[in-house]
Amino acid sequence: MNMQLLNLIQTAALATSLVCGACPALAEDYPAKPVRLITSDVGGAGDFVSRNLAPGLATALGQQIVIENRPAYAAELVARAAPDGYTLLLYGPTVWITPLVRKSGWEPLKDFAPIGLTVRAPNLLVVTPTLPIKSVKDLVSLARARPGELNFASSETGSSTHLAAELFKYMAGVNIVRINYKGPAMAITDIITGRVQLMFLVASSVKPHIQSGKLRVLATTTEKPTSLFPGVPTVAEFVPGYESAAQFGFFAPAQTPVAIVNRLSQETVRFLNLPEIRERYFNLGMEVVTNSPLQFGVMLKNETDKWTKVIKAAGIREE
């Protein structure tokens, strides 16, 4: 770990703990009322993660966890909330990617106190069966031989599926044209019929089509082979260093007392690592990947640096 970065995060944590003299008493009494947990729209992956975490966290804290489903710009609501631990955020990479893509009302490294990572949902690289390739190596060779002729489907600009493809283009040095869709359903249909050649997608949305042979899976976007997808190679085997996944982080407003952040972190880690909870997420193509507030802070900085380069190279900044 970069020592300068580590020292910076530790200094920030110390400053947070000194913000208010009443913090120790506040932390001892926390929580004295229900806690709001802001997450993604109903039915989204963040909503699923939150609704599975909330009961365990409520039991540990002795207070109700009230889930509020809101669009991604709700991150600003949490960033501006009182730093008392009663308004929290559980969201995917939109929180740290959106400010890189378009103007937003929050800065992820300044406006939040990181509590920890919760789960990760790797993407799968799938192609239409009519494409005469069997591996990522074949895809890279074909794309280099036919620059600008292949295309990939993606949904919202800055989404994990969109950026997984942009990272692939950037690291593999290929020119594949983006076809934008409002949602994954029509994109999947067009890949099946061959109108679009490839897409990076979460496993749950394409598993039935892979099993039926309507789509061909080439690789997973995890750095190393994962038990989530036995026998499926990684993109990194052919494009060294490649890794991309939808990661879901837990946040409090900046300057939330360290004692409160640490308690939320400890209870979250304890609950998510129960065998039955890990299995529940696993069955839906998600891996429990908990870490500490300090580790999560370092990860956020590294993710921001990584995606800043990709977004700049792809020219996808929206004003």
Image: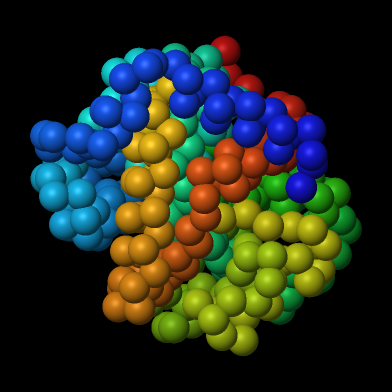
Q: Is residue 314 above or below residue 246?
A: above
- Please give the count of numbered marks on the rendered protein: 0
Q: Quadrant of the C terminus?
A: top right
Using the rendered image of the protein, determine whether residue 191 is visible from the camera's viewpoint: no
> Is 274 positioned to the left or the right of 165 in the image?
left
> In this view of the protein, which residue sits in the foreground, 235 or 227?
227
Which image quadrant for residue 282? bottom left
List the single residue furthest toward the bottom.
231
Q: How is the image coloured?
A: rainbow
Please state the horizontal and vertical placement of residue 257, each as a whole percent of the image. Answer: 39, 29
**Considering only vertical position in the picture, is 299 above or below 193?**
above
210 over 148 or under it: above or below: below
Please name whichever residue, 190 or 22, is drawn nearer the observer in this view of the structure. 22
The residue sitting at 31% across, 20% down in the picture is 22
- Residue drawn at (63%, 65%) of the image: 222
State the image coordinates of residue 13 (x, y, percent, origin top left): 55, 30
Q: Quadrant of residue 305?
A: top right
Say which quarter of the image contains residue 219: bottom right
Up the image or down, 104 lies above or below 222; here it is: above
Residue 294 percent coordinates (x, y): 57, 43
Q: Residue at x 61, y 69 (%)?
A: 220
Q: In the figure, is residue 304 to the left or right of 189? A: right
- Position of residue 227 measured from the top left corner of the image (x, y, whole percent): 54, 81
Q: Residue at x 65, y 50 (%)?
A: 165
> Horizontal placement of 141 versus 220: left or right?
right
